[in-house]
Image: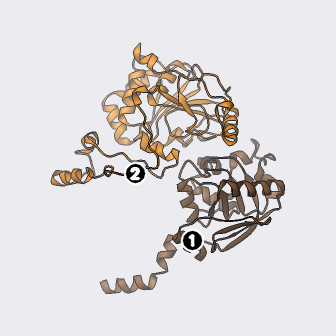
Chain colours: A brown, B orange
């Protein structure tokens, strides 16, 4: 898992509320056993037309969205099914952070374990960032995990909450298992005492 | 269990109800459940799993089930629900601009007219299944509606038991025969049309009454339109071919 320290990127605006995981990655893609490769299917049913070509009306297909690492989305993002494939697909497309006023709890937990930072901000901050991004798609947003701050180029600055364990893991680029393995020396010496 | 399951749709990590005598009676003697003295100890322990005296809650909701009509959803998330006899809301029913936008998007996806009733809406598929609503009690209720009746012409009706145990139990009670004689498909346990698995999916534009837990866009198949409802309401829709208040069939 890649470390998350700071991120500065333009953003994709998706103001819809209650975007559920069936939209993020429909169930028919859940048969994979590998985290990689789901980026092409992210938002599949909104993103592609019946003939499989790109839907030009969907924001992810706009030229201005390409290369973005931040998604700014309406409240209660990631509701519905608990599938871990949702953050896999978002990370697969290239997102590293999502800004919203609220996340579904299980989605948030899954994201934190997959290097995808949920940035929860107040309604005022969300609206200011959304307005800035929508009026100028090249607007850069900066996120600093160590200081838990998000900054817009117009001087807007806000902080966001994150639990200390998830923050530590993201900064180090490890998941829970990686955290345990960092105690490998102590685990081995304990096991030797038992044999 | 349906309430526990659906708590997640309201944003909860889990929904819990203190176990009572009905729960213990259900568990007693089952496989993988403590037996003998262990059983008594387990029940004693489980009795502690209730709300502490003086516990405080962020929000308390009181629902009098006796005063509820059968419920059904009209939109594209489980919160977009209403009593079955009501007309659907209109955009003016919502104060918040984002809720209004979500409502209009849902109506467009569902191909429905705001303010109109859902009763009488033709359906293409009825799905009685899923972990939410396919216990033996659900199947018994549904079988009560199917008994002596036939599924409406052109309505594909799937009955998918919640587990292998439930399938065996239902077959021992002859419920499978009632479903099959009525013209419904009696299937192996599994996710099936809850999540458009194993080829069980809606075609674009089709309407389904489904006892599963989610009515998101495309959940039961790309372009498919889902009305979530109870097993009784789903069974009634299978018989009439349209959204129906099941009480009209129970009383007749």
Residue at point 50%, 31% (across, down): B229
Work out whether B96 lies above or below B67.
below
Query: Is disc 1 placed on a helix, strand or loop?
Result: helix
| Residue A195 appears in the picture as rendered | no
Question: Picture quarter containing residue B108?
Answer: top right
In x, y percent, where is residue B243? 55, 23
Q: Which residue is mark 2?
A: B56
Q: Which mark is residue A157?
A: none
What chain does mark 2 sit on? B
Graded by Cα atoms within 10 Å as few (under 14), some (14 to 19) or many (20 or more), the crowding at tag 1 reads: some
Per the image, label 2 sits on a secondary structure element best described as loop
| Residue A136 image-quadrant placement | bottom right
Residue at image location 66% in from the left, 32% down from the top: B110
Taking the spot 57% from the left edge, 38% from the top edge, the residue there is B215
Instruction: Give the residue at mark 1.
Output: A167
- The location of residue B92, given as percent across then percent down, is 68, 31
Return the x and y of residue B73 as percentages of the image width and height: 56, 32
> Foreground mark, 1 or 2?
2
Which residue corresponds to the image point at 46% horizontal and 81% vertical from the top-left? A183
Chain name for mark 1:
A
Q: Please provide percent x and percent y for residue A63.
A: 83, 56
- How many other residues sit within 10 Å of disc 2, few (<14), some (14-19) or many (≥20)? few
**Going by the picture, which residue comes out furthest to the top?**
B252
């Amino acid at each position: 898992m890649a470390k998350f320290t700071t991120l500065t990127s333009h953003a994709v605006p998706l103001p819809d509320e209650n975007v559920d995981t069936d939209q993020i990655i429909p169930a028919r893609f859940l048969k994979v056993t590998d985290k990689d490769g789901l980026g092409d299917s992210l938002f599949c049913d909104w993103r592609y037309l019946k003939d499989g070509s790109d839907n030009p009306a969907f924001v992810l297909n706009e030229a201005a969205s390409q290369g973005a690492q931040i998604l700014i989305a309406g409240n209660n993002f990631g509701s519905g099914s608990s599938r871990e494939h949702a953050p896999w697909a978002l990370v697969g497309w290239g997102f590293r952070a999502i800004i919203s006023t609220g996340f579904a709890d299980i989605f948030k937990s899954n994201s934190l374990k997959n290097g995808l930072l949920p940035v929860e901000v107040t309604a005022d901050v969300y609206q200011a960032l959304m307005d800035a991004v929508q009026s100028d798609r090249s607007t850069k947003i900066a996120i600093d995990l160590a200081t838990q701050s998000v900054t817009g180029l117009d001087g807007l600055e806000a902080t966001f909450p994150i639990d200390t364990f998830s923050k530590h893991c993201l900064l180090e680029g490890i998941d829970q298992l990686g955290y345990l393995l960092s105690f490998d020396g102590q685990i081995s010496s304990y096991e030797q005492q038992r044999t | 269990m349906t309430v526990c399951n659906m708590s997640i749709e309201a944003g909860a990590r889990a929904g819990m109800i203190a176990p009572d005598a009905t729960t213990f009676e259900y568990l007693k003697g089952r496989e993988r459940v403590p037996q003998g003295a262990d059983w008594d100890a387990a029940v004693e322990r489980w009795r502690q799993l209730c709300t502490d005296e003086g516990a405080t809650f962020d929000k308390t909701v009181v629902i009098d089930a006796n005063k509820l009509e059968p419920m059904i959803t009209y939109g594209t998330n489980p919160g977009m629900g209403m009593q079955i006899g009501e007309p659907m809301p209109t955009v003016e029913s919502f104060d918040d601009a984002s809720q209004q936008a979500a409502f209009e998007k849902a109506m467009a996806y569902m191909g429905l007219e705001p303010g109109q009733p859902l009763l009488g809406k033709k359906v293409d598929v009825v799905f009685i299944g899923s972990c939410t609503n396919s216990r033996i009690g659900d199947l018994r209720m549904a079988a009560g509606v199917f008994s002596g009746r036939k599924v409406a012409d052109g309505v594909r009706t799937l009955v998918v038991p919640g587990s292998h145990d439930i399938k065996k139990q239902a077959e021992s009670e002859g419920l499978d025969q009632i479903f099959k004689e009525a013209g419904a498909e009696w299937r192996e346990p599994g996710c099936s049309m809850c999540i458009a698995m194993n080829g069980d999916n809606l075609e674009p534009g089709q309407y389904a009454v489904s006892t599963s837990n989610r009515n998101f866009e495309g959940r039961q198949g790309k372009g498919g339109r889902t009305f979530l409802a109870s097993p009784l309401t789903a069974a009634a829709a299978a018989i009439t071919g349209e959204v129906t208040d099941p009480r009209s069939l129970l009383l007749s």
